[in-house]
Every structure is written in C-alpha cells, then in structure tokens.
Image: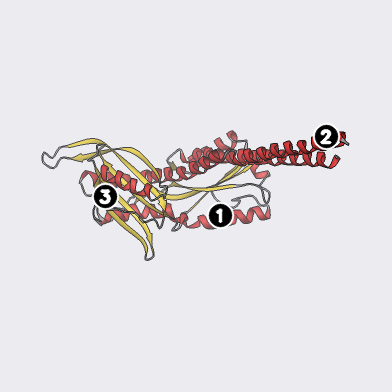
Amino acid sequence: MAKGVATLMDTVFLLLIASVAAAILVSAAANYGKNLRAQAGDLLTEYYVRQIIRVVSTATLNRPGCDTPDYLLAYLKEKVMYNEVADTATLKNLGDVLEDVMKPLGDAYDYAFYLQVGTGADANTYVFMWRHKSSGLEASCYSTTRKGLVQWRDALVSEHVSPRAYSVPTRLRIIDEKSGTSSYITGYMGVFLWPSGAKIDTFSLGTNKC
Amino acid sequence: MIVPIVLALFVFFGALGWATSAVNRTNSEVDMSLALIRVADAFAQWGVLTDDTWKTSCEAVTTKIQDVGFTVCLTSPEQVGNVLNSIKNDIKSGNQICGGMTYSCASAWSQSHPPRRGAPLLVRYFPVVFQTSTDTSVRNDVNFMVVVVWPRE
C-alpha cells in the first residue's frame, strides 16, 4: 500500500517537474528575440527615412523658364546662399518630391524636413512641415534656430509618437550681407516622420512663414 | 501510473517542440530583415540608379546573397499599391514575382523556387531615385524599389 502511494507520488512529482520545465521553456521561447525582432522592424523603418534624405539629395526638379532639370539640393543651397529659404516656392518644390516619396504611405504619417545653416544652438534652421488634416495635407514652413528645432523635437517625443529621424551634414555657402563676401559653413539637413493625427505644438518654431 | 508519466513526457516534449519552432521563427524573421536591408542597400548605395547601376547591383546580389530567396523590382510611386497586389496574386498562382516588369531582379534559386502559399514573407518598399537621360537633359525621378524576401527551406 505504502509502496503504491510512494510510486504515485513519484509520478505526480514527475508530472509537476515536467509542467514547470514546460512552462519555463514556453515563457523563454515566447520572449526570445522580442527586442531583436522589434529592432529589426525599426531598422527597416529607419532605412526608409534614410532613403528620403538620399532622394532629396539626388532628385531633380524643373525650374520655371529652364529647359533642363536641376538638382533639388542645388536649388536649396542656392536659396540658403541668398537667404530666401523659408518661402512658398521652396515649400512647393520640396513638397513635390516629398509627396512622391510619401505617396505609398498614404495619410498614415506626417513629416517634416529641415535645413540647418551652421552648427551652434543659434544656427538658422528652416523647417518645412506637412500634416494630414481633415481638409487634406497642410503644408507650413518656419524659420527658427537649432534650439527651437530641438525643443519642437522634444515636444514630438513627449507626445509618445516615436518620431523617426535621420540627418546628414552638408556644406553650405553663405554671403555676408555687409561685406558681400561669401564663405562655406557646415550645416545639416534632416527629416522627421511620425504617425499622423498627433497634436504637435509648433510654438518653439515661431510663426508660419508660408 | 503509466498515464501521468506519458502525460509528463507529452507536456515536456510538446513545449520543447513549440519553443524550438518559436525560436527558429524569430531567427528566420531577423535573418530575413537583415537580408532585405542587404539586398535593398546593394541597389540604393549608388544614390542614383541607372540602367547600368541596376544591372551591376543585380549581378552582385544574385551572386552574393544565397541564404534567402529574394526578388527586387522598380516601380513608380503611383504603382506601388498595384505591384504589392500583383505580388500577392503571383504567390497565390505560383508565378514568378514581378515577372513581367522591366526592372526586376531575382537569383536563379529564387526564380525556380518562388515562395509557396502561406510561407513567411517579408515585403518592403523604399524610395530611390532613377535616372533617365536624353541627348539634352538628365532627369532623376522618384521611384520605388519593392523588395520581397522569403526563407530558403
């Protein structure tokens, strides 16, 4: 009788140990590679954003009154040189290229492109933004500083919209208005992409210039 | 008495089988993501794609990337949705993916082994610039590179 009970207890313990081991296995396998999988997904999205900058760097546009297409980046650099960046023409030319780039994503994402002239906190920074509203795609442009851009980016992050961002350094030529001499400086161009519909405070960017 | 022992073995080996397949599935997904980036970057690295750079990249990736099946095709921004739908239909009917397109690239193995229905598949599209030139001008237009990757089983 006692031997039978002991055997029964052994099998119950075996079942218990097997169940615990199975539970540990299932839990470990379910969590295995969770971060890795998320990072691989992020990598693919970041690659898309990186490609946006590559496209802006190499795409061409048709300037009015000109037979041959010109590079969009050359056009932007020329605008920087003459200090005429934040205007409706730039917004339209840049918007035409970015609209093509964003077309397959539909109205899922809002986006912004910026051009920073210089590297300091007070460097002139031009921000072009496109947001999907009930009335359609709303475009706006701002002239701010690097500090203002960072504040806006922080506001974007605090909205928990996980913006994707990518930027590259670029060489810009500027003309000193007083002396009329020109010089080259380092700047940055970058892009932000975030899910549409988020309430984004643009206070730090100043007023809409376009 | 035999019943609890069989039950214990069944529970343990069942969980072991499930865990092994879950780990393999995750590894395969990560492998495919990295392979997709490698394939896409082979084409996008030029900055501007042309007939020649497309051919050069295609030769390079079909030789180098052998661990997964893949197909890359180039389309306009307006046609991305249609291409994605045609890929779905190609898989259903067992046809070669992007078969009739002007710019498509797939390894010999991928052409002879299209993904079977229900197989894990990774499809992504990325913007690229494609150059068309005439005697008097050069245009760089926005196009999309659609990349499809599936595991080699």
Q: Residues within 10 Å of mark 1 (few under 14, many from 20)?
A: some
Taking the image as drawn, is residue B31 in sight? Answer: yes
Distance in Å between CA atoms under marks 3 and 2: 76 Å
Badge 2 amino acid = Ala
Quarter where residue A1 is shown: top right
Q: Chain of mark 1?
A: B
Q: Secondary structure at mark 3?
A: helix
Identify the residue at horizontal 30%, vertical 43% (top origin).
A150
Residue designated by label 2: A6
- Which one is nearer the viewer's eye here, B106 or B132? B106
Q: In this rendering, is residue B36 above or below A107? A: above
Residue designated by label 3: A204
- Which one is nearer the viewer's eye here, A200 or A158? A158
Give residue A16's position: percent from left, percent from top.
Answer: 73, 38
Identify the residue at horizontal 24%, vertical 54% (top origin).
A87
Residue designated by label 1: B84
Identify the residue at horizontal 45%, vertical 56% (top origin).
A108
- Which one is nearer the viewer's eye here, B96 or A46? A46
- Residue A47 lies left or right of residue A142; in this view the side is right
Task: Name, please, the residue furthest toward the front.
Answer: A2
Which marked residue is nearer to the observer: mark 2 or mark 1? 2
Give residue A4's position: percent from left, percent from top.
Answer: 87, 36
Badge 3 amino acid = Ser
Distance in Å between CA atoms under marks 3 and 1: 40 Å
